[in-house]
Image (spheres, grey):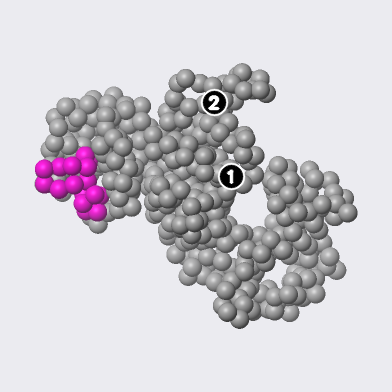
Amino acid sequence: MHKDRYKALIIDDEPAIRELLEITLNRMHVDTQSAPDLAVAKRLLGRESYDLCLTDMRLPDGNGVDFVAYMQSHYPKVPVAVITAHGNMETAITALKSGAFDFINKPVNLAVLRALVESALRLHDSSVHTGLLIGNSPAIQDLRKTITKLARSQAPIYICGESGTGKELVARMIHEEGPRAAQPFVPVNCGAIPRDLMESEFFGHKKGSFTGADIDKTGLFQAAEGGTLFLDEVAELPLPMQVKLLRAIQEKRIRPIGSQIEVPVNVRILSATHKNLAVEAERGSFRQDLFFRINVIEVRVPPLRERREDVLEIAAHIMHRYAQGISGQEYRIAEAAMDALQGYDFPGNVRELENILERAMTLCDEYEIKAGDLRLPQNQPVGMNMTTASGAVNLESYLNDIERKLVHEALEKHHWNLAATAASLSMTLRSLRYRMQKLTIRKG
Protein backbone atom coordinates (compact mmCIF):
# COMPACT_ATOMS: atom_id res chain seq x y z
CA MET A 1 0.00 0.00 0.00
CA HIS A 2 1.76 3.15 -1.21
CA LYS A 3 -0.62 6.03 -0.44
CA ASP A 4 -0.07 7.81 2.88
CA ARG A 5 -3.75 7.44 3.81
CA TYR A 6 -6.63 5.53 2.26
CA LYS A 7 -10.31 6.19 2.79
CA ALA A 8 -13.09 3.61 3.15
CA LEU A 9 -16.88 3.94 3.14
CA ILE A 10 -18.71 1.65 5.59
CA ILE A 11 -22.43 0.96 5.10
CA ASP A 12 -24.32 -0.87 7.85
CA ASP A 13 -27.47 -0.13 9.80
CA GLU A 14 -26.06 -1.63 13.02
CA PRO A 15 -24.03 0.99 14.97
CA ALA A 16 -22.00 -1.71 16.76
CA ILE A 17 -20.87 -3.24 13.44
CA ARG A 18 -20.00 0.18 12.03
CA GLU A 19 -17.93 0.95 15.12
CA LEU A 20 -16.08 -2.39 14.96
CA LEU A 21 -15.22 -1.85 11.29
CA GLU A 22 -14.18 1.77 11.89
CA ILE A 23 -11.84 0.86 14.75
CA THR A 24 -10.26 -2.00 12.82
CA LEU A 25 -9.65 0.09 9.68
CA ASN A 26 -8.43 3.12 11.65
CA ARG A 27 -5.80 0.88 13.27
CA MET A 28 -4.71 -0.01 9.74
CA HIS A 29 -4.29 3.76 9.06
CA VAL A 30 -7.38 3.82 6.86
CA ASP A 31 -9.73 6.78 7.29
CA THR A 32 -13.41 5.89 7.37
CA GLN A 33 -16.82 7.41 6.88
CA SER A 34 -20.02 5.55 7.70
CA ALA A 35 -23.59 5.43 6.42
CA PRO A 36 -26.62 3.66 7.93
CA ASP A 37 -28.30 3.12 4.55
CA LEU A 38 -27.82 3.39 0.79
CA ALA A 39 -29.29 6.87 0.47
CA VAL A 40 -26.70 8.39 2.80
CA ALA A 41 -23.96 6.30 1.17
CA LYS A 42 -24.80 7.62 -2.29
CA ARG A 43 -24.74 11.22 -1.00
CA LEU A 44 -21.28 10.64 0.51
CA LEU A 45 -20.06 9.06 -2.74
CA GLY A 46 -21.15 12.17 -4.60
CA ARG A 47 -18.99 14.36 -2.36
CA GLU A 48 -15.96 12.23 -1.51
CA SER A 49 -13.68 9.73 -3.24
CA TYR A 50 -13.02 6.37 -1.62
CA ASP A 51 -10.52 3.57 -2.04
CA LEU A 52 -12.82 0.86 -0.68
CA CYS A 53 -16.46 0.25 0.29
CA LEU A 54 -17.70 -2.25 2.88
CA THR A 55 -21.44 -2.84 2.83
CA ASP A 56 -23.84 -5.05 4.73
CA MET A 57 -26.01 -7.27 2.55
CA ARG A 58 -29.29 -6.23 4.21
CA LEU A 59 -29.99 -2.51 4.49
CA PRO A 60 -33.16 -0.54 5.30
CA ASP A 61 -33.53 0.84 1.76
CA GLY A 62 -32.01 -1.91 -0.38
CA ASN A 63 -29.46 -4.69 -0.44
CA GLY A 64 -25.77 -5.13 -0.99
CA VAL A 65 -26.15 -6.73 -4.42
CA ASP A 66 -28.01 -3.66 -5.71
CA PHE A 67 -25.31 -1.43 -4.26
CA VAL A 68 -22.58 -3.48 -5.97
CA ALA A 69 -24.39 -3.03 -9.28
CA TYR A 70 -24.69 0.71 -8.60
CA MET A 71 -20.96 0.96 -7.88
CA GLN A 72 -20.10 -1.02 -11.02
CA SER A 73 -22.11 1.50 -13.03
CA HIS A 74 -21.00 4.74 -11.32
CA TYR A 75 -17.67 4.02 -9.57
CA PRO A 76 -16.23 0.88 -11.23
CA LYS A 77 -12.69 1.41 -9.90
CA VAL A 78 -13.75 1.33 -6.24
CA PRO A 79 -13.70 -2.24 -4.85
CA VAL A 80 -16.80 -3.21 -2.86
CA ALA A 81 -16.80 -6.01 -0.27
CA VAL A 82 -20.11 -7.31 1.10
CA ILE A 83 -20.83 -8.57 4.62
CA THR A 84 -23.14 -11.58 4.60
CA ALA A 85 -24.90 -13.74 7.15
CA HIS A 86 -22.79 -16.74 8.14
CA GLY A 87 -23.23 -19.70 5.82
CA ASN A 88 -25.25 -17.80 3.21
CA MET A 89 -22.99 -18.73 0.32
CA GLU A 90 -25.67 -18.28 -2.32
CA THR A 91 -26.00 -14.60 -1.44
CA ALA A 92 -22.23 -14.16 -1.37
CA ILE A 93 -21.87 -15.75 -4.80
CA THR A 94 -24.64 -13.55 -6.21
CA ALA A 95 -22.72 -10.51 -4.98
CA LEU A 96 -19.48 -11.77 -6.53
CA LYS A 97 -21.21 -12.37 -9.86
CA SER A 98 -22.51 -8.78 -9.71
CA GLY A 99 -18.96 -7.49 -9.38
CA ALA A 100 -18.18 -7.48 -5.65
CA PHE A 101 -14.47 -7.57 -4.83
CA ASP A 102 -14.95 -10.14 -2.06
CA PHE A 103 -17.20 -11.08 0.84
CA ILE A 104 -16.87 -11.61 4.58
CA ASN A 105 -19.18 -13.55 6.90
CA LYS A 106 -20.79 -12.42 10.12
CA PRO A 107 -19.66 -12.57 12.87
CA VAL A 108 -16.75 -10.67 11.37
CA ASN A 109 -13.37 -12.33 11.85
CA LEU A 110 -10.95 -9.42 12.24
CA ALA A 111 -7.96 -11.29 10.79
CA VAL A 112 -10.00 -12.12 7.67
CA LEU A 113 -11.24 -8.51 7.51
CA ARG A 114 -7.70 -7.12 7.67
CA ALA A 115 -6.52 -9.47 4.90
CA LEU A 116 -9.49 -8.45 2.73
CA VAL A 117 -8.82 -4.73 3.26
CA GLU A 118 -5.11 -5.10 2.47
CA SER A 119 -5.92 -6.98 -0.76
CA ALA A 120 -8.46 -4.37 -1.82
CA LEU A 121 -6.10 -1.46 -1.19
CA ARG A 122 -3.27 -3.14 -3.09
CA LEU A 123 -5.44 -2.83 -6.20
CA HIS A 124 -4.28 0.78 -6.45
CA ASP A 125 -0.69 -0.39 -6.84
CA SER A 126 -1.19 -3.38 -9.14
CA SER A 127 0.34 -3.23 -12.61
CA VAL A 128 -0.89 -4.50 -15.95
CA HIS A 129 0.97 -6.98 -18.18
CA THR A 130 -1.59 -8.53 -20.50
CA GLY A 131 1.01 -8.47 -23.24
CA LEU A 132 1.86 -12.03 -22.17
CA LEU A 133 -0.98 -13.24 -24.39
CA ILE A 134 0.43 -13.23 -27.89
CA GLY A 135 -1.75 -12.14 -30.80
CA ASN A 136 -4.15 -9.38 -31.78
CA SER A 137 -7.18 -11.35 -32.95
CA PRO A 138 -10.57 -10.10 -31.65
CA ALA A 139 -10.81 -13.20 -29.44
CA ILE A 140 -7.49 -12.45 -27.72
CA GLN A 141 -8.22 -8.74 -27.38
CA ASP A 142 -11.50 -9.60 -25.64
CA LEU A 143 -9.70 -12.07 -23.38
CA ARG A 144 -7.12 -9.44 -22.38
CA LYS A 145 -9.89 -7.02 -21.39
CA THR A 146 -11.63 -9.75 -19.41
CA ILE A 147 -8.42 -10.61 -17.54
CA THR A 148 -7.83 -6.98 -16.60
CA LYS A 149 -11.36 -6.70 -15.24
CA LEU A 150 -11.33 -9.99 -13.34
CA ALA A 151 -7.93 -9.32 -11.78
CA ARG A 152 -9.59 -6.61 -9.67
CA SER A 153 -12.00 -9.08 -8.08
CA GLN A 154 -11.40 -11.85 -5.55
CA ALA A 155 -14.21 -13.99 -6.97
CA PRO A 156 -13.36 -17.62 -7.77
CA ILE A 157 -12.88 -18.06 -11.51
CA TYR A 158 -13.32 -21.16 -13.63
CA ILE A 159 -11.14 -21.14 -16.75
CA CYS A 160 -12.40 -23.47 -19.45
CA GLY A 161 -10.88 -24.40 -22.76
CA GLU A 162 -9.40 -27.25 -24.73
CA SER A 163 -6.07 -28.82 -23.80
CA GLY A 164 -3.10 -26.66 -24.75
CA THR A 165 -4.94 -23.34 -25.07
CA GLY A 166 -3.02 -21.66 -22.24
CA LYS A 167 -5.38 -21.86 -19.26
CA GLU A 168 -2.53 -21.69 -16.74
CA LEU A 169 -1.11 -18.63 -18.51
CA VAL A 170 -4.51 -16.92 -18.15
CA ALA A 171 -4.60 -17.87 -14.46
CA ARG A 172 -1.10 -16.44 -13.91
CA MET A 173 -2.07 -13.20 -15.63
CA ILE A 174 -5.19 -12.82 -13.48
CA HIS A 175 -2.96 -13.29 -10.43
CA GLU A 176 -0.17 -10.98 -11.60
CA GLU A 177 -2.49 -8.12 -12.51
CA GLY A 178 -4.33 -8.23 -9.21
CA PRO A 179 -3.65 -7.19 -5.63
CA ARG A 180 -2.11 -10.59 -4.76
CA ALA A 181 0.68 -10.28 -7.33
CA ALA A 182 3.43 -9.99 -4.69
CA GLN A 183 2.24 -13.18 -2.99
CA PRO A 184 2.61 -16.81 -4.19
CA PHE A 185 0.94 -18.26 -7.26
CA VAL A 186 0.68 -21.99 -6.58
CA PRO A 187 -0.41 -24.19 -9.52
CA VAL A 188 -1.41 -27.78 -8.83
CA ASN A 189 -2.30 -30.46 -11.37
CA CYS A 190 -5.12 -32.28 -9.59
CA GLY A 191 -4.77 -35.26 -11.91
CA ALA A 192 -1.12 -35.81 -10.99
CA ILE A 193 -1.60 -36.24 -7.21
CA PRO A 194 -2.03 -39.81 -5.96
CA ARG A 195 -5.45 -40.15 -4.35
CA ASP A 196 -4.13 -41.40 -1.02
CA LEU A 197 -1.92 -38.29 -0.71
CA MET A 198 -4.45 -35.66 -1.78
CA GLU A 199 -5.60 -34.50 1.65
CA SER A 200 -2.01 -34.22 2.87
CA GLU A 201 -0.98 -32.33 -0.29
CA PHE A 202 -3.81 -29.80 -0.01
CA PHE A 203 -4.05 -29.33 3.76
CA GLY A 204 -0.72 -30.56 5.11
CA HIS A 205 -0.16 -32.92 8.03
CA LYS A 206 1.38 -33.09 11.48
CA LYS A 207 4.34 -35.28 12.31
CA GLY A 208 3.25 -38.78 13.27
CA SER A 209 -0.31 -38.39 11.96
CA PHE A 210 0.12 -41.46 9.73
CA THR A 211 2.81 -43.95 8.73
CA GLY A 212 5.54 -42.08 6.89
CA ALA A 213 4.64 -38.65 8.31
CA ASP A 214 8.13 -38.05 9.74
CA ILE A 215 7.89 -34.25 9.76
CA ASP A 216 5.22 -31.56 9.73
CA LYS A 217 4.18 -30.78 6.16
CA THR A 218 2.75 -27.51 4.86
CA GLY A 219 -0.12 -28.03 2.43
CA LEU A 220 -0.84 -26.22 -0.81
CA PHE A 221 -3.42 -23.91 0.78
CA GLN A 222 -0.86 -22.64 3.29
CA ALA A 223 1.84 -22.45 0.59
CA ALA A 224 -0.45 -20.09 -1.34
CA GLU A 225 -1.26 -17.93 1.72
CA GLY A 226 -2.07 -14.39 0.64
CA GLY A 227 -1.86 -15.38 -3.02
CA THR A 228 -3.59 -17.62 -5.53
CA LEU A 229 -4.16 -21.39 -5.64
CA PHE A 230 -4.67 -22.59 -9.21
CA LEU A 231 -6.43 -25.95 -9.43
CA ASP A 232 -5.63 -27.28 -12.89
CA GLU A 233 -7.63 -30.29 -14.15
CA VAL A 234 -9.97 -29.84 -11.19
CA ALA A 235 -12.39 -32.39 -12.73
CA GLU A 236 -9.90 -35.13 -11.78
CA LEU A 237 -10.50 -34.65 -8.05
CA PRO A 238 -12.24 -37.68 -6.46
CA LEU A 239 -15.61 -37.00 -4.81
CA PRO A 240 -14.38 -37.36 -1.18
CA MET A 241 -11.71 -34.73 -1.83
CA GLN A 242 -14.28 -32.47 -3.49
CA VAL A 243 -16.25 -32.40 -0.22
CA LYS A 244 -13.18 -31.35 1.77
CA LEU A 245 -12.20 -28.76 -0.83
CA LEU A 246 -15.67 -27.23 -0.83
CA ARG A 247 -15.58 -26.80 2.94
CA ALA A 248 -12.11 -25.23 2.83
CA ILE A 249 -13.23 -22.71 0.20
CA GLN A 250 -16.46 -21.81 1.98
CA GLU A 251 -15.06 -21.58 5.51
CA LYS A 252 -11.67 -20.15 4.47
CA ARG A 253 -10.15 -22.59 6.95
CA ILE A 254 -8.28 -25.88 6.69
CA ARG A 255 -7.32 -28.57 9.20
CA PRO A 256 -4.01 -30.37 8.59
CA ILE A 257 -4.17 -34.15 9.05
CA GLY A 258 -3.50 -34.98 12.70
CA SER A 259 -4.19 -31.43 13.92
CA GLN A 260 -6.95 -30.51 16.35
CA ILE A 261 -6.86 -26.87 15.27
CA GLU A 262 -8.29 -25.28 12.15
CA VAL A 263 -6.01 -22.82 10.38
CA PRO A 264 -7.45 -19.73 8.62
CA VAL A 265 -6.31 -19.38 5.02
CA ASN A 266 -6.43 -16.39 2.71
CA VAL A 267 -6.19 -17.60 -0.88
CA ARG A 268 -7.94 -16.85 -4.14
CA ILE A 269 -9.14 -19.94 -5.98
CA LEU A 270 -8.76 -20.21 -9.76
CA SER A 271 -9.57 -23.53 -11.41
CA ALA A 272 -9.48 -25.04 -14.86
CA THR A 273 -10.13 -28.21 -16.84
CA HIS A 274 -10.33 -29.22 -20.47
CA LYS A 275 -13.46 -31.21 -19.66
CA ASN A 276 -16.99 -29.80 -19.68
CA LEU A 277 -17.45 -29.35 -15.94
CA ALA A 278 -21.20 -28.72 -16.23
CA VAL A 279 -21.61 -32.09 -17.95
CA GLU A 280 -19.42 -33.76 -15.30
CA ALA A 281 -21.66 -32.23 -12.60
CA GLU A 282 -24.80 -33.52 -14.34
CA ARG A 283 -23.27 -37.01 -14.52
CA GLY A 284 -22.52 -36.94 -10.81
CA SER A 285 -18.74 -37.23 -11.18
CA PHE A 286 -18.34 -33.64 -10.00
CA ARG A 287 -20.31 -32.14 -7.11
CA GLN A 288 -22.92 -29.57 -8.14
CA ASP A 289 -22.28 -27.46 -5.02
CA LEU A 290 -18.53 -27.32 -5.67
CA PHE A 291 -19.12 -26.47 -9.34
CA PHE A 292 -21.44 -23.66 -8.22
CA ARG A 293 -18.80 -22.40 -5.81
CA ILE A 294 -15.76 -22.38 -8.12
CA ASN A 295 -17.68 -21.27 -11.22
CA VAL A 296 -18.69 -17.84 -9.91
CA ILE A 297 -17.23 -16.35 -13.11
CA GLU A 298 -16.34 -18.39 -16.19
CA VAL A 299 -13.58 -17.47 -18.63
CA ARG A 300 -13.26 -19.31 -21.93
CA VAL A 301 -9.85 -19.50 -23.56
CA PRO A 302 -10.39 -19.77 -27.34
CA PRO A 303 -8.81 -22.62 -29.31
CA LEU A 304 -6.14 -21.74 -31.85
CA ARG A 305 -8.39 -22.54 -34.80
CA GLU A 306 -10.65 -19.64 -33.71
CA ARG A 307 -7.74 -17.19 -33.96
CA ARG A 308 -5.78 -18.36 -36.99
CA GLU A 309 -4.51 -14.81 -37.56
CA ASP A 310 -2.38 -15.22 -34.39
CA VAL A 311 -0.65 -18.46 -35.45
CA LEU A 312 2.34 -16.94 -37.24
CA GLU A 313 2.97 -14.39 -34.48
CA ILE A 314 2.90 -17.16 -31.86
CA ALA A 315 5.18 -19.28 -34.06
CA ALA A 316 7.68 -16.43 -34.36
CA HIS A 317 7.68 -16.03 -30.57
CA ILE A 318 8.26 -19.77 -30.04
CA MET A 319 11.12 -19.88 -32.54
CA HIS A 320 12.77 -16.80 -31.04
CA ARG A 321 12.52 -18.27 -27.52
CA TYR A 322 13.97 -21.58 -28.78
CA ALA A 323 16.82 -19.78 -30.53
CA GLN A 324 17.70 -17.78 -27.41
CA GLY A 325 17.51 -20.72 -25.06
CA ILE A 326 19.03 -23.57 -27.08
CA SER A 327 20.47 -22.97 -30.53
CA GLY A 328 21.66 -19.39 -30.38
CA GLN A 329 20.57 -19.09 -34.02
CA GLU A 330 17.38 -17.49 -35.30
CA TYR A 331 15.17 -19.65 -37.57
CA ARG A 332 13.29 -18.78 -40.73
CA ILE A 333 10.03 -20.35 -41.86
CA ALA A 334 9.27 -20.94 -45.53
CA GLU A 335 6.10 -19.55 -47.06
CA ALA A 336 4.69 -23.03 -47.74
CA ALA A 337 5.24 -23.91 -44.07
CA MET A 338 3.42 -20.72 -43.04
CA ASP A 339 0.46 -21.68 -45.21
CA ALA A 340 0.42 -25.18 -43.72
CA LEU A 341 0.42 -23.82 -40.17
CA GLN A 342 -2.38 -21.34 -40.84
CA GLY A 343 -4.50 -24.02 -42.49
CA TYR A 344 -4.08 -26.62 -39.75
CA ASP A 345 -6.71 -26.89 -36.99
CA PHE A 346 -4.35 -27.64 -34.07
CA PRO A 347 -6.50 -29.94 -31.94
CA GLY A 348 -3.69 -29.70 -29.36
CA ASN A 349 -3.68 -25.88 -29.65
CA VAL A 350 -0.66 -23.77 -28.63
CA ARG A 351 1.02 -26.70 -26.87
CA GLU A 352 0.81 -28.73 -30.08
CA LEU A 353 2.18 -25.78 -32.10
CA GLU A 354 5.15 -25.56 -29.70
CA ASN A 355 5.88 -29.27 -30.04
CA ILE A 356 5.57 -29.21 -33.84
CA LEU A 357 7.92 -26.22 -34.15
CA GLU A 358 10.51 -27.50 -31.67
CA ARG A 359 10.65 -30.80 -33.56
CA ALA A 360 10.84 -28.95 -36.90
CA MET A 361 13.71 -26.77 -35.65
CA THR A 362 15.58 -29.92 -34.67
CA LEU A 363 15.01 -31.55 -38.09
CA CYS A 364 15.32 -28.66 -40.51
CA ASP A 365 18.35 -27.80 -42.63
CA GLU A 366 20.17 -24.45 -42.55
CA TYR A 367 17.80 -23.00 -39.95
CA GLU A 368 14.88 -22.83 -42.37
CA ILE A 369 11.66 -24.70 -41.57
CA LYS A 370 9.97 -26.11 -44.66
CA ALA A 371 6.48 -27.58 -44.86
CA GLY A 372 7.81 -31.15 -44.72
CA ASP A 373 9.72 -30.42 -41.50
CA LEU A 374 6.45 -29.71 -39.71
CA ARG A 375 5.26 -33.31 -40.07
CA LEU A 376 1.67 -32.35 -39.48
CA PRO A 377 -0.54 -35.37 -38.61
CA GLN A 378 -1.87 -37.00 -41.74
CA ASN A 379 -5.10 -38.28 -40.22
CA GLN A 380 -6.50 -34.78 -40.08
CA PRO A 381 -6.65 -33.02 -43.46
CA VAL A 382 -5.49 -29.42 -43.28
CA GLY A 383 -8.35 -27.04 -42.54
CA MET A 384 -10.75 -29.81 -41.47
CA ASN A 385 -12.47 -29.85 -38.09
CA MET A 386 -12.42 -33.04 -36.03
CA THR A 387 -16.04 -34.00 -36.66
CA THR A 388 -17.68 -37.19 -37.82
CA ALA A 389 -20.42 -37.44 -40.41
CA SER A 390 -22.98 -37.23 -37.61
CA GLY A 391 -21.38 -34.02 -36.34
CA ALA A 392 -20.15 -35.60 -33.10
CA VAL A 393 -16.69 -34.58 -31.92
CA ASN A 394 -14.32 -37.27 -30.68
CA LEU A 395 -11.72 -34.72 -29.60
CA GLU A 396 -10.71 -36.44 -26.36
CA SER A 397 -9.53 -39.58 -28.15
CA TYR A 398 -7.77 -37.59 -30.84
CA LEU A 399 -5.93 -35.40 -28.32
CA ASN A 400 -4.84 -38.49 -26.39
CA ASP A 401 -3.42 -39.96 -29.61
CA ILE A 402 -1.46 -36.79 -30.29
CA GLU A 403 -0.19 -36.54 -26.72
CA ARG A 404 0.77 -40.24 -26.70
CA LYS A 405 2.78 -39.72 -29.92
CA LEU A 406 4.53 -36.60 -28.61
CA VAL A 407 5.41 -38.13 -25.23
CA HIS A 408 6.66 -41.32 -26.89
CA GLU A 409 8.84 -39.32 -29.29
CA ALA A 410 10.30 -37.34 -26.40
CA LEU A 411 11.04 -40.54 -24.48
CA GLU A 412 12.79 -42.03 -27.51
CA LYS A 413 14.78 -38.84 -28.05
CA HIS A 414 16.04 -38.93 -24.45
CA HIS A 415 16.59 -42.72 -24.46
CA TRP A 416 13.78 -43.22 -21.94
CA ASN A 417 15.46 -41.03 -19.34
CA LEU A 418 12.33 -39.87 -17.50
CA ALA A 419 13.91 -36.85 -15.81
CA ALA A 420 15.31 -35.50 -19.09
CA THR A 421 12.03 -36.22 -20.90
CA ALA A 422 9.98 -34.45 -18.23
CA ALA A 423 12.26 -31.40 -18.43
CA SER A 424 11.97 -31.29 -22.24
CA LEU A 425 8.17 -31.39 -21.98
CA SER A 426 8.09 -28.72 -19.22
CA MET A 427 6.37 -31.03 -16.74
CA THR A 428 7.25 -32.61 -13.42
CA LEU A 429 8.56 -36.16 -13.19
CA ARG A 430 5.44 -37.19 -11.29
CA SER A 431 3.21 -35.63 -13.94
CA LEU A 432 5.12 -37.48 -16.70
CA ARG A 433 4.68 -40.80 -14.90
CA TYR A 434 0.98 -40.06 -14.52
CA ARG A 435 0.62 -39.23 -18.24
CA MET A 436 2.51 -42.40 -19.21
CA GLN A 437 0.20 -44.48 -17.06
CA LYS A 438 -2.94 -42.76 -18.37
CA LEU A 439 -1.81 -43.01 -22.00
CA THR A 440 -0.51 -46.61 -21.54
CA ILE A 441 3.01 -45.76 -22.72
CA ARG A 442 5.54 -48.49 -22.02
CA LYS A 443 9.07 -49.15 -23.22
CA GLY A 444 9.48 -51.88 -25.87
Q: Amino acid at mark 1?
A: Cys
Q: Are marks 2 and 1 in contact (CB under 8 Å)?
A: no
Element under disc 1: helix
Pick whichever, 363 or 387, lies toward us. 387
- Left or right? Give the position of 322 relative to 208: right
Mark 1 residue crowding within 10 angstroms, few (<14) / some (14–19) / many (20+): many
Element under disc 2: loop
N-terminal of the two: label 2 or label 1? 1
Task: Tell me what residue is drawn at x 58 percent, y 36 percent.
Answer: 198
Pick whichever, 302 or 132, lies toward us. 302
Residue 420 at what x, y percent from top left?
Answer: 80, 46
Marks 2 and 1, how far apart at CA: 19 Å
Observer able to see residue 17: yes
| In the image, farthest residue toward the bottom | 389
Q: Nearer the viewer, mark 2 or mark 1?
A: 2
Q: Amino acid at mark 2?
A: Ile
Task: Tell me what residue is drawn at x 56 percent, y 66 percent.
Answer: 303
Residue labelled with disc 1: 190
Residue 268 at what x, y percent from top left?
Answer: 44, 41
Task: Tell me what residue is drawn at x 40 percent, y 50 percent.
Answer: 292
Residue labelled with disc 2: 257
- Left or right? Give the position of 78 relative to 245: left
Give the quarter of the figure containing the N terminus: top left
Task: Tell me what residue is drawn at x 77 percent, y 61 percent.
Answer: 405
Residue 46 at what x, y percent from top left?
Answer: 15, 49
Tell me which segment is drawn in magenta: 54-70
